[in-house]
Image (cartoon, helix red, strand yellow):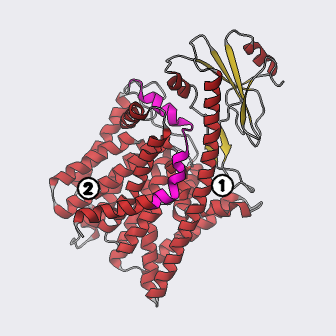
Amino acid sequence: MPKFCKTLLPLGVYLILAALVFHRDLSVGFLCDDVYAIDLSLRPWLSYEEGSYQFLGPAFAVNYTLFRLFHLNPLPYHVFHLFWVVVNAALTKALAETLGLKPWQAWAAGLLALFNSVAAEAIFWYAVFPTVMMTTSVLMGLLCLARFRLTGSGIWKWAYLGLALFAPLMESKGVILPLLGYLLDRWWGVPDASTWKSRIFSGWRLHFAAFGVMGSTLLLRAGLGIRSYVIDMPPYEKFKTFMATLVNTFFHGVDDHISPFLGGIPYVPVYYALLLVLLALLLWALIISPAAERRRLSILILAWWAASLPHTLAANVQPRYFYLPGVFAALVLVELWESFSRKARNPRMAYVLVGLILSGYLAMDLRGFRYSLDSYQEASRIYDAGIRFIKERAPVLTPDTRLLLIDFPDYIYSRQGQRRIRKYYALLYRNALPSHLRLLYAAEKLDVSLVRLSAPSRDNPVPLGKPATPAEVKEMLAQPRTLAIQYLPNPPRFVEVPETPGD
């Protein structure tokens, strides 16, 4: 098979599989930060206010281009996003092959990277595409580093350094690329070195340069007045975030699938139990593996843990943060399964068992994606209905018109884990209004107020806006040229508010 076709084959296969599983995502509209991010891209790119946490230049360029081409049609945005998810699956397979894993391992690693339902937020929520493209940059950087070590061609070295600069500019967690490059370079660097010490210090000049490039991005952020995004959590909470990341990316959120059946069992002990199982499996695989495979597995484990560090140190547990670590968890999993197959008395039966385990992972992922997509589609229907209702009631919105939006929902609970534990949600209007309305009406300034009239409920857990009484809302309605629209859940609908709220 020609090399060109051999390169495109995985991309084509994963693209077909993604189309079969993710096609319903193309019917999801904009949610939450989506239009907010597009709106920001139409403003000065280097104008950072105090409190900004990201350098968004590359993301702004993507959003600006898509908006100029497609305006507020969400379909092209989702197609663009999902394409890079598929590319990352193909790059994961390529990285596995470069590391010397067997063909079946490489294909399986790509599948696990493509279908990791615990990171569904990163896959189905368009505003998270910088995380997906940052992961693309990291994987391409590692492949460029490998090509440099294997061929000695300087073009790959400069490509690696360029991606070490680009990855954190695409999304700040890309700062981890130089560390990942150093770890994996212990496998590619000096294969004929006789001691571990020589491998540790081999190629240090390139890594020194990569860390220097990464440092330059931090200086750029500081020069632009961009602050570091850090949630001040105690060390134990950070450890729980790290633990949750390992458990969810290794087991693909198996704890989420069993959570409805736990009843009153505290959640944290379940995490600890799964973490102990995880560590026992890894220790067992390290003990039984031959020296070369043991070193490779050790390096992959360290890379997986390193990829989990940025959000562990700076943020909290969010499904979108599981996407990058999930790629390296996939490589660890297939190496673990190969260790099991290598040790089994009957290798053929061992591979049958591995196939069943992989099928179990994919079955859990497909189930998780079904719940996630159902939830995102439901949230999208509510979001679109609200925008459409506003447009119907105010086909033209003049600057002197005041919009009063009452009880517009922050999020709805996801259908995942609805039986007893309700910890997942699909975001709706958070940060979306008035950005969407500004773009919809092509108006720079609109008088939009969000108020909360109703108490939180199961169907509307967090109504947006400042708390207000019926009397206060009535006073607002008395002002001239005021259009008030209220969201009513169960069933979800929007109504124009009469002069006396609650009538």
N-term-proximal mark, 2 vs 1: 2
**Residue 464: image location, x then y, percent:** 67, 30
State the extent of the magenta-drawn residues as a range. Answer: 17-44
Q: Residue furthest right?
A: 503
Residue at 63% over, 25% down: 392
Residue at 60% over, 64% down: 254
Q: Crowdedness of circle 2 by 10 Å Cα count: few (<14), some, many (20+)?
A: many
Q: Residue furthest left?
A: 153
**Residue 357: image location, x then y, percent:** 53, 74
Q: Is residue 366 magenta?
A: no
Residue 277 occupies quadrant: bottom right
Q: Is residue 390 left or right of residue 328?
A: right
Residue 460 occupies quadrant: top right
**Residue 260: image location, x then y, percent:** 72, 60
Q: What amino acid type should be assigned to the residue bearing mark 1?
A: Gln
Residue at 31% over, 71% down: 100
Residue at 33% over, 38% down: 217
Q: Is residue 155 left or right of residue 407?
A: left
Q: Which mark is residue 416?
A: 1
Q: Is residue 84 visible?
A: yes
Q: What amino acid type should be assigned to the residue bearing mark 2?
A: Cys
